[in-house]
């Protein structure tokens, strides 16, 4: 969050942004530009080799209707 090295806080921001994009796709599209530094953290974490391999691989668990992030397409 505050330096050039990855931290667990960075991973938390990544998961939060991903979840909010899934949960509120329209709202996030409208407001993400107001939070460029948070989105940049999300993008940097997603680009880490281990994270990228997980995101592109079959082990990734998709968001679903039983988790903390539920999908509201109208929002």
Image (cartoon, helix red, strand yellow):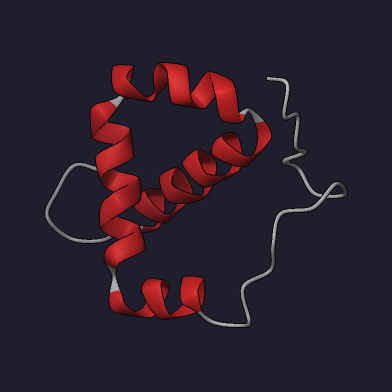
Total labels drawn: 0
Residue 50's place in the image compared with 28, above or below, is below
In the image, what residue occupies the spot 30% across and 21% down? 33
Q: x and y percent of residue 75 in the render?
A: 68, 20
Residue 47's place in the image compared with 64, above or below, is below
Q: x and y percent of residue 2 in the render?
A: 19, 42
Q: x and y percent of residue 71 in the render?
A: 75, 37
In the image, what residue occupies the spot 62% across and 41% down? 22
Q: Which residue sits furthest right? A: 66
In the image, what residue occupies the spot 28% across and 45% down? 41
In the image, what residue occupies the spot 48% across and 39% down? 17
Q: Quadrant of residue 35?
A: top left
Q: x and y percent of residue 55 in the render?
A: 49, 70
Q: Quadrant of residue 63?
A: bottom right
Residue 38's place in the image compared with 66, above or below, is above
Q: Is residue 18 left or right of residue 60?
A: left
Q: Is residue 26 left or right of residue 1?
A: right
Quadrant that contains the N terminus: top left
Q: Is residue 5 left or right of residue 11?
A: left
């Amino acid at each position: 969050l505050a330096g050039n090295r990855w931290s667990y806080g960075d991973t938390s921001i990544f998961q939060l942004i991903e979840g909010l994009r899934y949960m509120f796709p329209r709202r996030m599209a409208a407001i993400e530009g107001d939070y460029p530094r948070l989105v940049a953290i999300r993008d940097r974490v997603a680009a880490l080799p281990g994270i990228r391999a997980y995101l592109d691989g079959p082990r990734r668990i998709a968001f679903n209707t039983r988790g903390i992030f539920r999908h509201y397409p109208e929002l």
